[in-house]
Amino acid sequence: MQLKQAWIIAKKEFKAAFKDKIFVVITILFLLLSIMSVYIGGSTKNAELKAYSDIVAYIKSQGSSVFPPKPIIYPLAILQNIINYVSIVGAVLAVFLGFDTFSSEKENGTLRLLLSRPIYRDQLLSGKLLGGTMVIGLLLSVTLVFNTFLFTLVSDIKPEVLEISRLIVFILIAFCYMMSFYIASVFVSIKTKDRSFGFLVMLIAWITISFVIPQLAESQKAFAYALNSTAQSITKLPEDTTISKVIEIFSPAVQFQNIGGDLLQVSANSANISILEIFKIRFSSLVYMLIPGIVMLFGAYKSFLKEEV
Amino acid sequence: MLITKNLTKKYEDFIAVDNLDLHIEEGSIFGFLGHNGAGKTTTISMLTTLILPSTGTATIGGYDIVKENLKVRKLLGYLPESVMLYGELTAYQNLKFFGELSGVENIDMRIDEVLELLQFTKWKNKKINTFSKGMRQRIGIAQSLLHKPKILFLDEPTSGLDPQGTKSMRDLLLMLNKEWGTTIFMNTHLLSEVTKICTHIGIIGRGKLLLSDSIEGVKKMFPGEKSLEEIYFKIEGDDAVEAGLDNSKKRI
């Protein structure tokens, strides 16, 4: 009975999400951006290959047989822009989905009605979270199918099992990343009665995580470079410093971009290593990315069970 | 049907409900009177298991509101003050959602039955956000009746309604009580409503129960007073004036 009730709530949440016009607009934007990213990535790679073919043809026409090395194409790198779209637009989407989960129910009095029905509070919260999980899951599944199809169409590369596996794992990581934002938004909506205030709090959190912290880490790197170049001990901007790494711990967005970059073969260093190897290397990134969501999840259950309505 | 013993709710140093003792018989219509901030809504919130009492006990239909809250919720129907329901859903969709949550069987048949009883069938497929306040209150009542509750809790059910809506709500409550034998616990500060429909009243002031009896019993207690209104002001008047002064001081 209790599971059935959580399912009833989940179904309602799922349907309600797609009745929200702003959410639908952001969803469409997200899908369009992900499709565009495949198209742009594919076109860039095709142009790169065409330029190489033209050079080879030109060299041949000059009677030479010494050709420059063929550019290495990592197929999934075509999709690399999607990392940024998930990290920024995906996070906004998750915030929109969760920011008024409970605050709107408090505002219109329906939370009191729901809690006067024979349902446990944890089941009500689980139902709400399940509904949001279904929405994010559906969205990313559609993105996966669309992108794989478009990837084949645009790039003329037939993805192999390894590539498809990396893409699926990337989508799963994206799912965890978006769920962190969603759960944080639900937590905030439990703690506040005012949906506008809840949205403002999540907006500040999103800006901090997606822009302020990464920018702070970049500034620190530039500062370290400035100091060292004055002392003439280094000659180029470092990829990271100990302090910038510590700063980035507080940004799940950066951690997601690190893991996503490795999975989608953005860097030649990690393009050919196995998924397991990526997880070994990026274990700490994964932990830093998941911790805020897990803490918020526990916080949400603890707060909601005690909440007086 | 409903018994409370020393039911108390404290918020830090503020006592919202203070040692409340109530005994409400099955089939009665109980009007719970008091000025704003007297503790009516806190009492109803505890009885509908929305908030936990600080001390004391209460049982509904023999079940403890804290230890057996799920069983209690199966027995009760609740209509909060100014409920909006889900505006983007139709009356039918709202009722189906709340009915399924309450485990109502043959839900479609039951919805039709309740809507017919409330003479609301023709608005079944209209969205709630197109309804007037009176219509929303009516559909709010409908959701609280779906699972055939033994006791119905209503928080200021006629608040904000026009005279026609008020009369219509009053007739509905009388009919529910008469036809289905539903016990009704109604928070209100409208004496006219109480005199027209209630069989019993309780008066609360500053969290304390000042009086609780049948309407006849109350009238016998104050033989010199002509109306319930005079009795109410006699019992509660000084307290209400003091509460009013306190509120003014807070505002200043």
Image (cartoon, coloured by chain):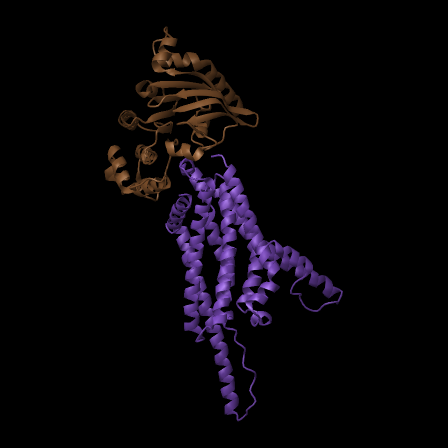
Chain colours: A purple, B brown
Q: In the image, residue B109 lies at what x, y percent?
A: 26, 40
The image quadrant of residue B170 is top left
Residue at the extreme top: B224
Q: Is residue A13 left or right of residue A177?
A: left
Q: Answer above or below: position of A131 versus A55.
A: above
Residue at the extreme front: B62
Residue at the extreme bottom: A63
Question: Is B217 or A256 nearer to us in this picture?
Answer: B217
The image quadrant of residue B102 is top left
> Which quadrant would the N terminus of chain A be assigned to in this image?
top left
Q: Which residue is drawn at the image coordinates 39% and 15% (left, top)?
A: B213
Q: In the image, residue A121 lies at what x, y percent?
A: 46, 40
Q: Is residue B82 visible?
A: no
The image quadrant of residue A223 is bottom right
Q: Which residue is drawn at the image coordinates 36% and 14% (left, top)?
A: B229
Q: In the image, residue B203 lies at what x, y percent?
A: 42, 18
- Report the number of discs: 0
Q: Answer above or below: position of A55 versus A218.
A: below
Question: Is B52 or B244 nearer to us in this picture?
Answer: B52
Q: Answer above or below: position of A275 versus B61.
A: below
Q: Is residue B26 visible?
A: yes
Q: Is residue B152 left or right of residue A227?
A: left
Question: Is A38 or A270 nearer to us in this picture?
Answer: A270
